[in-house]
Image (cartoon, rainbow, N blue to C red):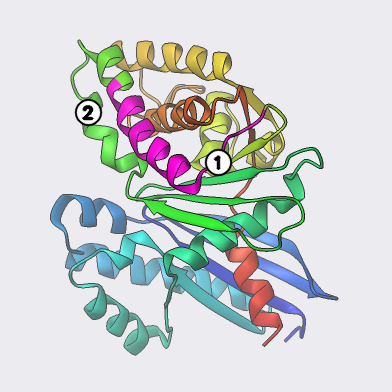
Amino acid sequence: MKKNMYAGVDIGSGSARLAICEVVDGKAKTKYFELFGHKLGHDNKSFGTLTEQTMQDTLNTFRKILEKCDDFEVKAVEFSATEAIRAASNSKQFLETVKQELGIDIRILHEKEEATFAYLGAQKLFKDSAENVLVMDIGRGSIELALGSLNQREPKEYISHKLGTMVFRDLLDSKTDLDKSFNKIIQQIKTDFNETINTWDIDFKNSDQLIGLGMSLFTYGYIHGLTESEMVKGEGKELTLDELYSYAEDQLENLRNEVCHRSNKGVLSQGDVPVLATLIALLESAGLDSITLGRTRIPQGIALELASK
């Protein structure tokens, strides 16, 4: 077993992210990363609970993750979960089953931890010129906002909005009113964002910075036909408001014409189109013209934390 190999698993609403890291001198270098799909968020949204089939399928997914950790001779691994498990009515039962069958104690991240991990993971992208940096991590079940600056190790403000992409998917069902529905999503998200920005009493300047993590980067990758392993190519890319509206126009047309995202590169699924609305909403609420894309590094943060214990 290699002494400096640690793994973190971030269980979101639609997938579990595994990062196997080599930790040396307090820094984590990702040696292996993989996304594992699941239906925890789908069940929670549809039924308010986790079905037996989904729980069993997820257990099998966790087994695959543990096997991958064994392949890399990982010293320790920690599983963490966010909105997908937090909100389910039978989450306690699921956690107990995972413990009994796999010996895994899933750590439920509270909102501050989730926002802080997102913030820390984005710090390599912070601009020296920005007095305020607002980091947004878009997930399937929730959106985390964390506010800070280059010189702040942890965010000075944070909040979790229950506005993940799955919340708005069904609003795009009617193909005759897509433009109206898309704008409705933007306005609904802006209402929440505006309230947060006003509460924090922040007046963004042109030199300030917005960073989008999570589904922000993946949506850009899907539009440009990148595979999951190639998504890193989009990190650091800045998207303007005009570009986002242009992407949205193209993707709404794809939805209108029922172009299949599975068989056509560059086409977003109905569930991913709300990501564009979320990015647009943040830019307009902040009064800024661009947003920097980055990777969510919650599993890397967990691995690094494990190594320090």
Asked if residue 187 lies in the magenta stretch, the reply is yes
Which of 28/125 is in front?
125
Residue 189, label in figure: none
The tag earlier along the polypeptide, 1 or 2, is: 2
Residue 267 seen from this side: yes
Residue at screen point 68% across, 35% down: 208
- Magenta: predominant secondary structure element? helix
- Image position of 86 (left or right of 264): left
Which of 164/154 is in front?
154
* Quadrant showing the N terminus: bottom right
Q: How many marks?
A: 2
Residue 107 lies, with reference to residue 133, above or below; the image says: below
* Quadrant showing the C terminus: bottom right
Camera-near label (1 vs 2) is 1
Residue under numbered circle 2: 171
Q: Position of residue 127 (x, y in %)?
A: 77, 41
Residue at screen point 52% across, 59% down: 115
Residue under numbered circle 1: 202
Density class for disc 1 (Cα within 10 Å; few <14, some 14-19, many ≥20) is few
Q: Which residues are magenta?
A: 184-205
Q: Which amino acid, mark 2?
A: Leu
Residue at screen point 58% across, 46% down: 135
Density class for disc 2 (Cα within 10 Å; few <14, some 14-19, many ≥20) is some
